[in-house]
Image: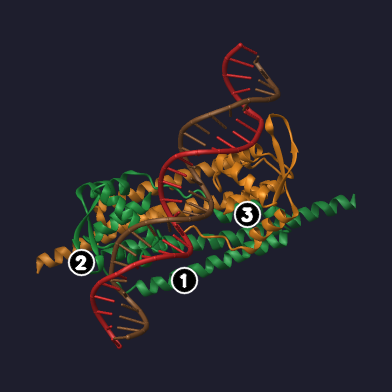
Chain colours: A orange, B green, C brown, D red
Amino acid sequence: MSLRHAALGLLALRGEASGYDLLGIFNESLEHVWPATQSQLYTELGKLTDAELVEVVAEGGRGRKAYAVTDAGRKEFEHWLLEEPPTVNRRNDLLLRVFFLGLVPTERGQEFLRERAVAAADMHERLRELERSLATEEGPLAVHGRLALEWGLRYSRMQEEWATWAAEQLAEEESAGQRIAEVAVEQ
Amino acid sequence: MSLRHAALGLLALRGEASGYDLLGIFNESLEHVWPATQSQLYTELGKLTDAELVEVVAEGGRGRKAYAVTDAGRKEFEHWLLEEPPTVNRRNDLLLRVFFLGLVPTERGQEFLRERAVAAADMHERLRELERSLATEEGPLAVHGRLALEWGLRYSRMQEEWATWAAEQLAEEESAGQRIAEVAVEQ
DNA sequence: AAAGACATGTAACCGGTTACATGATTCG
DNA sequence: CGAATCATGTAACCGGTTACATGTCTTT
């Protein structure tokens, strides 16, 4: 249930914002960390209002409603941020496929892993570019954004190295299997 | 929609199995990669049967049904495995919190990051133990399991190093901020 | 006879996605 | 005037979780 806390956090950062404003932040700053759809966000703001964790502090043209966190909301947010242990993402599509790689010829498996290495390298490069474009920006928000960016850089690098290593492992495994087969034939 | 493909893959590996058998595998081998509940698995086997990707090949006592993949199922599975690009998990609870770390005192932020480092180190150690217990096992399945395990080892190591680094960054940022404040006071 | 493993199924709910629906204001 | 942007809301659907419900076979 983190969209709720993401919304609370953004309102805490901004002081006050409309659903539309928050949606912009989700699509820009939080796109790679916690995406949200318009539908979901408006629904959640309704629920947050009902739970009195946020309140409408102003209404403007075009039906605009500006929200702000209440004291209860800020408390709930800080509890989530520091007290609740982050939930680890247990499902991993990549590793699930790796688990089944024995069902296809070794060559196809290696190909798959090498493709993953390339994809990870691409991602790394895209993040490097983002880093360069962010280098000039200042402000306290930028500091924490950079921590997240560095995580992405390290993650993509790890993934690339692992995939390359894993492809080599498959090659070794196959040649070891062949040697055993050859010895068996010789005897 | 990967539970579907996980089930197909397990049936392809096993040749034939019941829902109950598959559930055991999900709870043991796939627990950290793609967990599944009993409810979900039985429902999915029903859908797979309707779609003619699997079929009931035997019925035994206690209402047991043994399933096997059909040709169409095997084709669908291999297409998923090698052709469909793995979907990247976009939501990251940890990074979402990092994004908001500016809302609490630097000390609390550092504390949070150091806790993450410890949690990652713990996970690393648990995987090391798993590795030792697996060292004696043989078989083609073990090879790919080891690739996944190595991913986990590298991931937890990366996370630990990153969290430690990030906590240091916050410390530096704060002392830099203080120096600026001190200079401002002196002038 | 009781306990535990084997075995399957359904219903309610929840978070999230896609698509549908509507309207106001601003800018060129 | 028309297009783009601002702005909010609802309904249907989907994958996944929790809980409920039922019954059989084996082992002690």
Q: Position of residue A154 (x, y in %)?
A: 52, 53
Under mark 3, the amino acid is Val
Q: Counting residues from the N terminus, which is met first, the one under dot 2 or under dot 3?
A: 2
Q: Quadrant of residue A169?
A: bottom left
Question: Are both tags, 2 and 1, on one chain?
Answer: yes
- Identify which amino acid the numbered label 1 is placed on: Arg
Q: Earlier in the sequence, mark 3 or mark 1?
A: 3
Q: Are marks 2 and 1 in contact (CB under 8 Å)?
A: no
Q: Residue at x 73, y 33 (%)?
A: A60
Report if the CB atoms under discs 3 and 1 are less than 8 Å apart: no
Q: How many marks?
A: 3
- Looking at the rendered structure, the kind of residue marked 2 is Gly
Quarter holding residue A42: top right
On the image, the x and y values in percent for residue B29 come to 35, 65
Residue at x-position 44% and y-position 71% = B128
Q: Secondary structure at mark 3?
A: helix
Residue tagged by mark 1? B126
Residue tagged 2: B60
Relative vertical location of residue C1 with respect to residue A181 in this rendering, above or below: below
User: Subunit of mark 2?
Assistant: B
| Residue indicated by mark 3 | B98
For residue A121, side relative to residue A6 (left or right): left
**Between B129 and D3, which is closer to the camera in this rendering?**
D3
Which is nearer the N-term, disc 2 or disc 1?
2
Tag on residue B106? none
Circle 2 or circle 1, nearest the eye: 2
